[in-house]
Each structure stands twice: as structure tokens, then as C-alpha cells.
Amino acid sequence: MIGFWTLFYKELLRFWKVAFQTVGAPVLTALLYLLIFGHVLDEHVQVHGVRYTSFLIPGLVMMQVLQNAFANSSSSLIQAKITGSIVFVLLPPIPYGAFFAAYVLASVARGLMVGLGVLVATLWFAELRMAAPLWVLAFAVLGAAILGALGMIAGLWSEKFDQLAAFQNFLIMPLTMLSGVFYSIHSLPAFWQGVSHYNPVFYMIDGFRYGFFGVSDVAPEASLAVVVACFAAVSLLTLNLLRRGWKLRA
Amino acid sequence: MVSAVSIVDVVKHFGALQALVGVSLDIAEGEFFGLLGPNGAGKTTLISTLAGLVRADSGHLSVLGNDVVRDYRKARSLLGVVPQELVFDPFFSVRETLRIQSGYFGLRHNDDWIDEILENLDLAGKADVNMRRLSGGMKRRVLVAQALVHKPPVIVLDEPTAGVDVELRQGLWQFVRRLNGEGHTIILTTHYLEEAEALCGRIALMKQGRIIALDTTANLMAAHPGGSLEDVFVRTMNQ
Ligand SMILES: Nc1ncnc2c1ncn2[C@@H]1O[C@H](COP(=O)(O)OP(=O)(O)OP(=O)(O)O)[C@@H](O)[C@H]1O
Ligand SMILES: [Mg+2]
């Protein structure tokens, strides 16, 4: 257990020591999106009966939660692999389950911290109520955990920074951007609505948004079921890779 | 009596390259053992299979009777390895690095021992300095310190004195000798053969993934009268 806590604490310190970049910068990015899209569209667009700025905020919060959770575990692993400091965690008797839990929970912590930062910063731009805070928390935690685990897979798989960047740019970014962060999928043509239902991130954002407005494209229970199933699948895969020492132990 | 390290018929390929070609070796508790050989002989690969960093294709390895695959947690907790590559985590100070490493081995409140290690490796003055700001030799000392945080009964040093100044080298050997005197088993690789000659009770010479000579230092030297260990090394390699 001490091994787990130490690794978790180390992973927290790692991003906290550079919080300006790892927490501050994503909050600023989200604010820029909000200023630009909110300014351009707020007058003209209403979604689910709320003003566009208010609609946009939960999506932006969740987008940053997810992207930062992914960035945390993936960048930590790739850095440790490239610098060789990964040996410090491979030599000790840390069970692979503890290894998994430490990286994923640190990713969740970073995701939630960024999400909270975005949320607080945007309070100046629009008033926001939370119809069901527990749904908000459940989707934020599970979404961050899924992306944290995916980040582990990406970090294990990549041997160079550009491979990790490819994973991020060609998989994670499209999945999050095309998930309904900026729009309700009901505004899409039928074909793309259908496609969106195969994107797990859509359910994370839709369920998260339900927690704010009490309305969503899909019933929140259904979204939760999808998200829990995704978490189980990604976790099993990651644990299996770690158990085999995939790309860690030659 | 159980061996500190037991290696039986270990084979390892990297693609087409045979890095270890059926290596067997037994090291008793309390030995000061030298693993010598030219670049690429397979010394680091052998150490890595023992530490679980590399998985052997076949064969068995154990540390104090604990199989490094089946009882990996026990085996790893009994082993301290100083890696050959000069690696460090740039986020932390020396003391943070050592506290974190202690935690990985399940130890809290390890500061008394950490202070003692720092003192012995002449690092006490650098305890709160970030790893990035240390010179190469100092980083190497921290690597040694990291391998010792859990007082492992078996200590493996893979070229610990590369790039380290004379004073520290002597300090390091004094410290390692003391640990050996207290019962720790020491396994050393080095290209400084005078060091091996002075320190090691028994030596294995490796070449191209095989052990080609294995004996006490005294016997190896006696086979080539009048020569240094370097002469023995050169003649054995060219046989
Ligand atoms: N991860 C790896 N992938 C592919 N080949 C490897 C790997 N590690 C080692 N080798 C090869 O295995 C052989 C043995 O290497 P090893 O590092 O064990 O040698 P060594 O005896 O430690 O040499 P040195 O004295 O230079 O440290 C070399 O030919 C090396 O190129
Ligand atoms: Mg080597």
C-alpha cells in the first residue's frame, strides 16, 4: 500500500510543481474558447433552451478534464521511458494493480483540478446552476479515469514524443471535439447523429451536461452505463498490458 | 545454504542477437563478486534479467531463493541495483528522490538511513538541491544512494564509478566494503580492473553472452603468474 501511495503522491507532485503549465494553461485555453465562441454565438443560438454561452461551459469544462487526464498519464510515462527514469518504478516490488491505480488517480486529480479551475473562471461570464451535482461528479471522475487509462496505454505504446502526439492529435482530439462540446448532436444531420452515438466521449459530455441543465440528448442512466462499460474495458486492457510488462520490460 | 543469487541456463535474444547464451552462475551470501567483460559481453543484460527489467527467454533466476518471475515482489525487495545509465528524475531534489524511492519499497520514515547514506556518499550538502543541478558524478552517487534505501541484502553495482572522482571512488568503496562486511552480498561490474582485483573475492569473465572464466581472484591471478588482472583479462579474452 505504501508503494501505491508514494507513486500516487509522486505523480501528483510531478504536475503540481509545474501547475502553471499543467493547470493554469488549460484554464486559459478554455476561457479563450468561451470568449470567442460565446461572443460570436451567444446572441443567436440557444440549445436545450439555454443561452449558448451557458450551454458551452459544461462542454468546455469536460473537454479540458478529459484532455488533461490523458495528458497527465501519457506524458509522465513517455518522459520516464525516454529519460530512462522509468527504472526507478520498475525495480521496486510495486504490484501492477497499484501502478495502474496510482497513474489513473493522479490523472483524475489533474483533470478535476483543471475542470474546477475552468468552472470557477467561467462563473464571471454566465450564471450556471447545477441541477444534479452528483451526475456532474460521476461523469467527471469516470471520464477522467477512462482518459487517464487511455493515456497509460498511449504512453506505454509510444517510443517517441511524436508517436504520442499522433495518438493525441488523431484519436483523442477528434473524439473530444466531435462529441458535442460545441453543439447538441440534435443539430447534426441524421447520419452524423448516428456516428456520434459510437463515440464514447459523446456520452461523457452529454451526461456531464445533464448534471447542469437536467436535460440531455440521451438519458443519463444510459450514458452512465456506456461510460462504466468503457471504463471497465479500458482498465482491463491496461491492467493486462501492465501485467505482461508490455513495452516496459524487454 | 541458499544462494544470494542463482542463475540457471539463462538465454536471452534481442531479435537475431544472442545476448545471453545459457548463462549459469551461483553467488553465495556475503560474497564480493566481480562480473567483468568487454563492451557488449552481456553483463548489463544479465543484471537486468535478475532485476526483472528484461525477461529471459528461458532459464531461471532467483534472489535468496525467490524466483524473479514467480516471486517477483520478494525478489525485488531483496535486490538493490545501481543502473549503468546515468538516469534521474528532474522534478525532485536529492532528498525527495530518496524518500520517494523508499516509499516504492514500502518504507516510510526512512530519514535516519537516508541521512547516513548521504553522509557516506558525500552528498549531505546537496540534499535539498534539485537533481538537474547536480554534476554527472553527483548524479551517479544519487543512483547508488537510491539502490540502497531499502538496505537490500544483495547489491548490484553496474559500473558505479564511471565518471566519479578519485575521492568519491575511495569513499564509495569504503562504504560498499563496510556493507559487505555487514553481510550484504555485492555484485560489481567495472572496466577498472584494478578495482575489481582489489575488491572482488571471485570473478566471472564474460564474452559474447557466455561466462568463459569463473574463479576466485587469487586462482585467476595464479594461472598467469606475475601479471595483473588486466593481463589475465586480455589473455583469457584472446584464447
Ligand atoms: N534492449 C536491447 N535491445 C537490443 N539489443 C540489446 C538491448 N540491450 C542490450 N542489447 C545488446 O545485447 C548485447 C549485450 O549488451 P549489454 O548491455 O548486456 O553489454 P555489457 O556487457 O553490459 O556492455 P558494457 O560494458 O558496454 O556495458 C549488446 O550487443 C547489446 O547491443
Ligand atoms: Mg553494461
Image (spheres, rainbow, N blue to C red):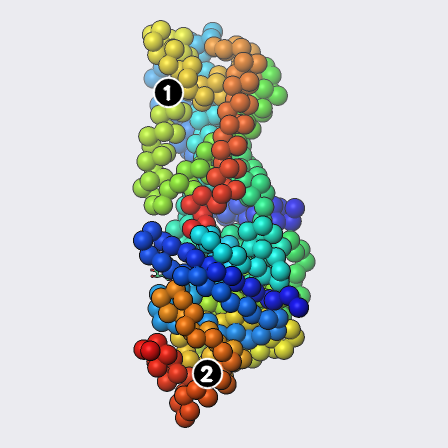
For the image shown, how many numbered marks are present on the structure? 2
Mark 2 closeness class: few <14, some 14–19, many ≥20 residues within 10 Å: many
Location of residue A130 by image quarter: top right
Farthest-out residue, bottom: B226
What's the distance in space between the residues labelled 2 and 1, CA to CA? 71 Å
Pointers 2 and 1 within a single chain: no
Question: Chain letter of disc 2?
Answer: B
Amino acid carrying mark 1 in the image? Leu
Residue A125, horizontal then vertical, whole percent: 46, 22
Does the CB distance between marks 2 and 1 fall below 8 Å? no
Numbered tag placed on residue B220 in the rendering = 2
Q: Which residue is mark 1?
A: A178
Q: Is residue B13 above or below residue B113?
A: above
Location of residue B26 by image quarter: bottom right
- Give whichever of B234, A48 is nearer the camera: B234
Asked if residue B158 shows in the view, the reply is yes
Residue B49, horizontal then vertical, whole percent: 48, 57
Residue A216, horizontal then vertical, whole percent: 50, 11
> In front: mark 2 or mark 1?
2
Question: Chain letter of disc 1?
Answer: A
Asked if residue B85 shows in the view, the reply is no
